[in-house]
């Protein structure tokens, strides 16, 4: 569904991603894990079209089987093609209500009925958001904000949903909940690209994983393979 | 722990707490950094490490608690006065004076110890000229010792990334600090550069008689260079100890790798 | 001062204040999104008045139609200014955009000077608006009622757009977090253009009513109302539409009342707003309704 | 030869050359041309001072016209003779001690600068806590307040009538003398470590504080020095055109100076000088579009305002297409010149 071929990303003076190649098959959960500064976020920001200096190829194949090159495109193109992204740090708009945040996620859509029913769908996925639908985003707790961010990403009815550090700053119980949701979203037919620091939780849900270290893929394999690999721990704690 | 407490304390924080609105970014942080040591402050993203640096260097005023520097209470002292006291730092996202040359960056660091006044410049007072000359020479000397002399007249933002990090340290050294805070000095460096950085940090301590506190994500660097480590998570100190103890501390592993490791390990 | 006089001054103040408020809204919307002081905004105010003048005098259009056309034309001008002078500078240092804004302001003023000449023009006031009516002892111009009513209607319309429509939602989102809003598929440039368009429309409406109230127009008539409206926007809390309107009202009130109570200070009239500005900036830079913008270290 | 000595000799030669040119110009150029030369010098003083504030210290100040007004009024009050003053104040008589004050030109210009610097200092203390465009608006506000106050304190300033018949002492020698002094003073500061400190504040205020720089103090210093020279420029301007009134010191004047600085290059002193030459001549040359033009028997009427139209278009073009101006942040130096041409085409 999404093929990334020798991608390079430059940030200020930094060569953040140094030629990584990644493949995301339709219907799977793929995760990029690695310590801070490994280049995970830069990779998905490149897919979204948020960074300027990008080399390499990012090819997205939509539902209709047409392949589109994503490098050099804007985020709008990405959304229209059927990719949604929940950015790092959740980035809930604090002054908008929960419902408005969700509506913003559905910005490109014009089918009011569909939007209403999707909002309802998100609420049934996250009942706590329904209770808070008129509350401002900024008043939600961290976990609720994360749920809202995931829900917001679902609102554009994407085929591929990219989640940047959804467990960041969440208490362990909530982390578990977030990963359960990811599994559920996936089982409903959405492809998921997950960027995580929380390696073990990510590996447990992922079909396939790439471990990044200073801009390179150092290890890849299925979730189970990597879970039992001692090098994973080394990549984090310096052996 | 015993060797740790024997030397006099360079920097100490007591019950340091800061709240932004409802969020407690740093909560009851107690650090005691012995004179002459290299120590680390680590933790996952958003744990409050940089916030702690910002409090120590006077950019934030703590909600509660104290910062002591060689026994002197410097809590809430303005940043430029903190620098004068002898604490200098680098920044996570390099903050060089980007339009200035490498040499000028270091000379700016020398300013805090400069005795002459601005109005002496147009008067060409001999005292002033002598001091300017001395600053220039000292800056060249610093650049030489740090290996940046060939770049002296380059504009600082044209330097390679690693060199910019070193220049930031050189600039911090120009303020003649006794205590150096390094915020992710290895960020964006490859393993080879990180290795060199470790040697460099050790050499710095020796040559300039410094005490060094660093924040770092690259665990190879932290474990390789720090004698003692504090681990923050959600603004709370969850562990402290030597590198070995930290590496095998289940709480730390959990903070970094996620909770499920305890079941798997 | 007699009560009657006071009420008359009050009406004057509300008229003036709502005119400032309408202009202030444009500043606050653009600043809220781009952190840019659009110096050319006061000149859009002036253009509105001139378009109105040409509509009624040159083309003999009825008052209402001329006004609508003038508002629309000025709105287009506002969007055009953004397209030419600000959009190319989105990634540039903000100060560049500010200098560009000053340049555009001078360009519009001097181009108007060339095209419309520097002679002050007399605007035709519809008779019913300037026929003084007496309520009890109080003598007021119908204009002093019409202007605030129209102004408040326009503001309510704007609030409806901002709080009840999809582009309005995007506009509010952009003012806090451009990047995230882009991730939702919003075309930021279009929304910014919309903000310029709406702000300019309100400024033009204000210019038209200003010309009806003070019926002499000239190419530099927008300079001082522009400055003062910006001050009103800062006063109300930059980024807040309601704040801009309240700030405008208070500024109008302060100006009229100081002169009413201390006629000897009337020479300093133009200084009040600036003094107020400096006091606000020093006491409460976020204004009455604004939120704090934080620096990141 | 030691480059330092070489540069000093070359600088002296350059000044001598300038002196020679002025001596020649005084005898051979017509009044209008001399006036343009004078304006170049005064504009250069103003541009250098604004560049110190904005280009080197990063404070977006739009208050230059206010300081110029102070300089011009203080100096004019000192060089006008008591008899002239008694004649001029029609609405209200001029009050003591302004009625009897009189001083030589040099003293009056210095006084103009000092009063401007003092007011600048008083403004700086509260206003420089602000940053960015708020600072711009606040300084502009102060300039307007200064103008309104000058309009209203008739017993001192003759109100909106302004001052006429100011002695025209400010000839080529005075103007270029002050220009050279301004240049020397600012160059010495900018090239010292204090210049580096100013630039550090401009580039990154947080890092500057972290380097032990009392940023507020140095911002105030830079602002006051800038205000001093703006006052000097205003004083010379008053004596040069012999008539001043409050309207003259509107925002437009600040804008002209800003235009010169931006054209020359923010943070480049040689750029400011170059900008003064280019913009002053351009502005004079543009007058022709405003004057009636006769071609054969046709008379094309002048278009008032056209000059400023072209001028503002120019500013917009510069900002859109060459934001760094003529020189960027670079300086024209002897060393640079020798590096390029002196060593037989050895280029970098």
Image (spheres, coloured by chain):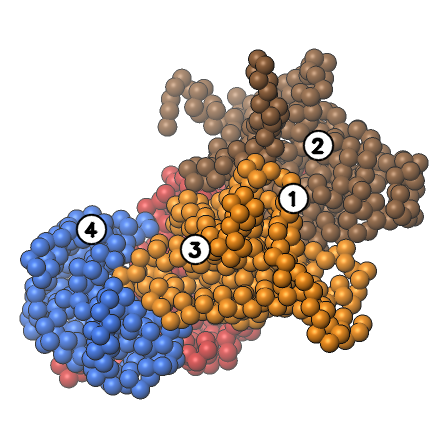
The relative height of residue B227 versus residue A4 in the rendered view (above or below) is below
Same chain shared by disc 3 and disc 2 = no
Give the Cα separation between the discs numbered 1 and 3.
27 Å
Quadrant for the C terminus of chain B, please.
bottom left
Q: In the image, residue B238 lies at what x, y percent?
A: 33, 80
Q: Mark 2 = which residue? A: D178
Visible residue check, residue A21: no
Foreground label between 4 and 2? 4
Image point (33%, 77%), residue name: A98
SS for tag 3? Answer: helix
Q: In the rendered image, what is the letter of the chain coloured red?
A: B
Foreground label between 3 and 2? 3
Q: In this rendered view, identify the residue nearer to me: D35 or D224.
A: D35
> How many callouts does the rendering have?
4
Q: Mark 1 = which residue? A: C120
- Label 1 marks which chain's residue? C
Q: Colour of chain C?
A: orange
SS for tag 2? Answer: helix
Q: Colour of chain D?
A: brown
- Label 4 marks which chain's residue? A
Give the Cα separation between the discs numbered 2 and 1.
42 Å
Image point (32%, 46%), residue name: B160
Q: Which mark is residue C197?
A: 3
């Amino acid at each position: 569904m999404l093929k990334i071929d020798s991608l390079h990303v430059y940030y200020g003076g930094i060569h953040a991603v140094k030629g990584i190649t990644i493949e995301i098959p339709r219907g799977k959960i793929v995760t990029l894990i690695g310590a801070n500064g490994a280049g995970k976020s830069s990779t998905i920001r490149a897919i979204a079209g948020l960074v300027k200096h990008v080399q390499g190829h990012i090819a997205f194949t939509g539902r209709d089987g047409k392949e589109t090159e994503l490098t050099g495109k804007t985020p709008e193109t990405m959304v229209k093609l059927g990719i949604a992204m929940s950015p790092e740090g959740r980035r809930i708009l604090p002054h908008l209500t929960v419902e408005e945040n969700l509506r913003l996620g559905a910005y490109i859509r014009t089918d009011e009925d569909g939007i209403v029913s999707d909002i309802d769908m998100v609420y049934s996925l996250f009942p706590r958001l329904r209770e808070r639908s008129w509350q401002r985003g900024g008043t939600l707790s961290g976990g609720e904000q994360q749920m809202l961010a995931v829900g917001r990403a679902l609102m554009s009815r994407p085929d591929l949903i990219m989640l940047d550090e959804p467990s960041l700053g969440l208490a362990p119980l909530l982390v578990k909940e977030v990963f359960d949701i990811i599994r559920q979203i996936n089982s409903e037919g959405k492809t998921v690209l997950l960027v995580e620091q929380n390696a073990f939780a990510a590996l447990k849900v992922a079909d396939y994983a790439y471990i990044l270290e200073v801009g390179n893929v150092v290890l890849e394999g299925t979730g189970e393979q990597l879970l039992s690999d001692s090098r994973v721990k080394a990549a984090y704690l310096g052996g | 722990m015993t060797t740790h407490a024997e030397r006099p304390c360079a920097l100490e924080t007591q019950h340091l707490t800061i709240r932004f609105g409802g969020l407690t970014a740093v909560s009851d942080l107690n650090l005691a950094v012995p004179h002459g040591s290299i120590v680390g402050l680590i933790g996952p993203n958003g744990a409050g490490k940089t916030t702690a640096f910002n409090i120590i260097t006077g950019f934030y005023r703590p909600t509660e608690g104290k910062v002591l520097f060689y026994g002197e209470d410097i809590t809430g002292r303005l940043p430029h006065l903190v620098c004068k006291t002898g604490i200098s730092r680098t920044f996570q996202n390099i903050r060089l004076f980007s339009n200035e040359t490498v040499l000028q960056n270091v000379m700016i660091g020398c300013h805090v110890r400069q005795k002459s006044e601005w109005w002496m410049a147009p008067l060409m007072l001999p005292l002033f000229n002598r001091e300017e000359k001395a600053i220039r020479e000292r800056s060249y000397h610093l650049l030489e010792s740090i290996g940046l002399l060939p770049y002296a007249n380059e504009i600082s933002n044209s330097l390679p990334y690693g060199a910019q990090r070193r220049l930031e340290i050189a600039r911090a050294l120009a303020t003649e600090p006794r205590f150096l805070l390094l915020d992710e000095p290895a960020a964006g460096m490859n393993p080879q550069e990180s290795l060199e950085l470790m040697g460099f940090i050790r050499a710095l301590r020796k040559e300039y008689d410094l005490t060094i506190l660093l924040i770092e994500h690259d665990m190879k660097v932290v474990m390789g260079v720090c004698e003692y480590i504090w681990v923050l998570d959600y603004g709370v100190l969850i562990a402290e100890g030597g590198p070995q103890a930290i590496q095998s501390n289940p709480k730390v592993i959990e903070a970094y790798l996620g909770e499920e490791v305890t079941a798997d390990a | 001062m007699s009560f009657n006089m006071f009420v008359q001054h009050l009406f004057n103040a509300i008229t003036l204040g709502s005119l400032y408020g309408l202009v202030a809204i444009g500043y606050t919307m653009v600043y809220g999104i781009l952190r840019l002081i659009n110096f050319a905004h006061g000149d859009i105010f002036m253009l509105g008045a001139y378009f109105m003048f040409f509509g009624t005098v040159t083309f003999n259009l009825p008052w209402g139609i001329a006004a609508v056309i003038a508002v629309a034309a000025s709105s287009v001008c506002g969007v055009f200014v953004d397209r030419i002078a600000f959009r190319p500078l989105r990634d540039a240092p903000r100060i560049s955009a500010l200098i560009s804004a000053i340049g555009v302001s001078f360009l519009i003023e001097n181009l108007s000077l060339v095209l419309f000449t520097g002679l002050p023009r007399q605007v035709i006031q519809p008779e019913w608006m300037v026929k003084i009516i007496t309520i009890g002892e109080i003598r007021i111009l119908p204009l002093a009622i019409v202007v605030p009513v129209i102004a408040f209607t326009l503001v309510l319309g704007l609030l409806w757009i901002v709080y009840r429509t999809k582009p309005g939602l995007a506009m509010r989102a952009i003012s806090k977090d451009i990047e995230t809003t882009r991730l939702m598929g919003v075309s930021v440039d279009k929304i910014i253009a919309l903000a310029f368009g709406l702000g300019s429309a309100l400024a033009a409406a204000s210019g038209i009513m200003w010309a009806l109230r003070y019926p002499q127009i000239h190419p530099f008539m927008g300079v001082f109302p522009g400055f003062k409206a910006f001050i009103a926007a800062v006063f109300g809390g930059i980024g807040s539409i309601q704040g801009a309107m309240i700030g405008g009202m208070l500024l109008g009130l302060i100006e009229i009342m100081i002169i009413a109570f201390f006629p000897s200070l009337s020479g300093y009239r133009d200084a009040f707003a600036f003094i107020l500005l400096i006091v606000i900036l020093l006491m409460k830079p976020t204004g009455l309704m604004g939120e704090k913008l934080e620096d990141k270290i | 030869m030691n480059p330092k000595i070489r540069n000093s000799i070359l600088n002296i030669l350059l000044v001598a050359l300038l002196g020679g040119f002025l001596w020649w110009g005084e005898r051979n150029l017509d009044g209008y041309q001399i006036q343009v030369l004078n304006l170049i010098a005064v504009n250069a003083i103003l541009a250098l001072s604004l560049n110190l504030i904005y280009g080197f210290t990063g404070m977006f100040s739009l208050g230059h016209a206010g300081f110029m007004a102070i300089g011009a009024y203080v100096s004019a009050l000192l060089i006008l003779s008591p008899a002239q003053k008694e004649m001029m104040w029609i609405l209200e008589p001029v009050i003591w001690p302004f009625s009897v004050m009189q001083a030589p030109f040099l003293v009056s210009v210095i006084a103009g600068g000092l009063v401007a610097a003092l007011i600048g200092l008083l403004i700086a203390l509260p206003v420089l806590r602000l940053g960015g465009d708020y600072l711009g608006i606040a300084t502009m506000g102060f300039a307007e307040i200064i103008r309104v106050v000058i309009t209203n304190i008739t017993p001192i300033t003759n109100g909106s009538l302004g001052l006429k018949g100011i002695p025209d002492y400010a000839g080529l020698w005075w103007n270029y003398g002050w220009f050279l002094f301004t240049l020397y003073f600012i160059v010495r500061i900018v090239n010292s470590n204090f210049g580096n400190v100013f630039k550090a504040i401009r580039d990154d205020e947080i890092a500057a504080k972290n380097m032990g720089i009392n940023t507020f103090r140095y911002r105030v210093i830079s602002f006051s020095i800038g205000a001093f020279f703006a006052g000097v420029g205003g004083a010379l301007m008053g004596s040069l055109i012999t008539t001043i009134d409050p309207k003259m010191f509107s925002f437009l004047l600040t804008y002209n100076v800003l235009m010169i600085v931006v054209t020359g290059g923010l943070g480049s002193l040689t750029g400011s000088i170059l900008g003064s030459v280019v913009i002053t001549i351009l502005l004079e040359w543009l007058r022709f579009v405003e004057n009636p033009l006769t071609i054969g028997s046709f008379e094309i009427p002048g278009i008032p305002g056209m000059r400023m139209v072209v001028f503002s278009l120019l500013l917009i073009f510069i900002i859109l297409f060459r934001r760094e101006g003529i020189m960027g942040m670079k300086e024209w130096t002897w060393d640079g010149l020798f590096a390029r041409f002196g060593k037989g085409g050895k280029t970098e």
